[in-house]
Image: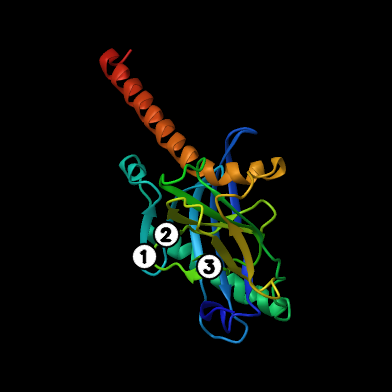
Amino acid sequence: MATGMKGLAGYLWLLPLLGCHLVPGEEVLSQVAFVQRSLNSSEQGPGEFMFDWDGDEIFHVDLEDKETVWRLPQFQEFTGFQAEGALGNIAVLRSNLDILMRRSNYTPAQNVPPKVMVYPEKPVVLGEPNVLICLANEFSPPVINLTWWKNGQKVKNQEKEIDFYPNVDNSFRRFSYLPFVPDPEDIYYCRVEHWGLAQPLTKEWNTNMPKPLPETAENVACGLGLAVGIAGIVLGTVLIFRSRRKHDEDNFRRGPL
């Protein structure tokens, strides 16, 4: 087990999820927050606070630096969010978690192992820069290590991970991205460590790997859809603000009736 996961077994976790349907049956704006704590530690443990739109992150709050981190800088041009509100929310959750731990007689959370797949961001062309995506999905609790290996050597300081994303069944998913240049001689591995696994799970990828099967297309679209969905949010936000501004200008020109 990796160093970052030692001493954490027995975590309890809490996930309040608030969804607001802005367009019934089609789009959901969600506020997501969770906290965790070890049974054998008095420390508060990690937590997360974020807003997402149909599974795409809008922003999260860095609980240590106490600041709002926007997935795309353009978002903060149209709206804002005070990190203090998230900190207050997290404090309430930590208090509630302590109560639930006592009421449950300190029963630990169930460990559900992740489902893992590795795939390229776009069709592979030898010598053309691309991005490998490692998706760990449907796991709980949200404590996991994703590491990249190339030709038997661990890749350092190149990969990028995003926050934990909640699923509707209160499980989680997480992506890790690795920029690379396809070469038929290279073999890549995504190594996944989680309490639900008896031993680390390793998924291989190389240029000879077959394309994802039809039943995995939805998961692939989920990873690739992050950028597309976020771009759509930006465009929609721009249109909303332009429409609102035009409406205000028209009312100003008309004056009182």
Q: Is residue 185 above or below residue 140?
A: above
Q: Is residue 76 left or right of residue 135?
A: left
Q: Given the image, on which type of amino acid does mark 1 rest?
A: Lys
Sequence-earlier tag: 2 or 3? 2
Residue bearing the label numbered 3: 92
Residue 116, quarter of the rendered image: bottom right
Q: Given the image, on which type of amino acid does mark 3 rest?
A: Val
Question: Which mark is nearer the camera, 1 or 3?
Answer: 1
Instruction: Pick the quarter of the image with the C terminus.
Output: top left
Q: Position of residue 83 (x, y in %)?
A: 38, 59
Task: Determine whether label 2 and label 1 are within 8 Å by CB.
Answer: yes
Task: Determine whether label 2 and label 3 are within 8 Å by CB.
Answer: no
Question: How far apart, in angstroms, are the residues tagged by discs 1 and 3?
Answer: 16 Å
Residue bearing the label numbered 1: 66
Question: Is the image coloured rainbow, by chain, by secondary structure, or in one colour?
Answer: rainbow
Total marks drawn?
3
Residue bearing the label numbered 2: 61
Task: Label 2, secondary structure: give it.
Answer: strand
Task: Label 1, secondary structure: give it.
Answer: loop
Residue placed most toward the observer, 167 or 82: 167
Question: How far apart, in angstroms, are the residues tagged by discs 2 and 1?
Answer: 7 Å
Residue placed most toward the observer, 128 or 136: 128
Q: Residue at x 45, y 64 (%)?
A: 88
Residue placed most toward the observer, 187 or 130: 187
Numbered label attached to residue 253: none
Q: Is residue 65 left or right of residue 209?
A: left
Q: Given the image, on which type of amino acid does mark 2 rest?
A: Val
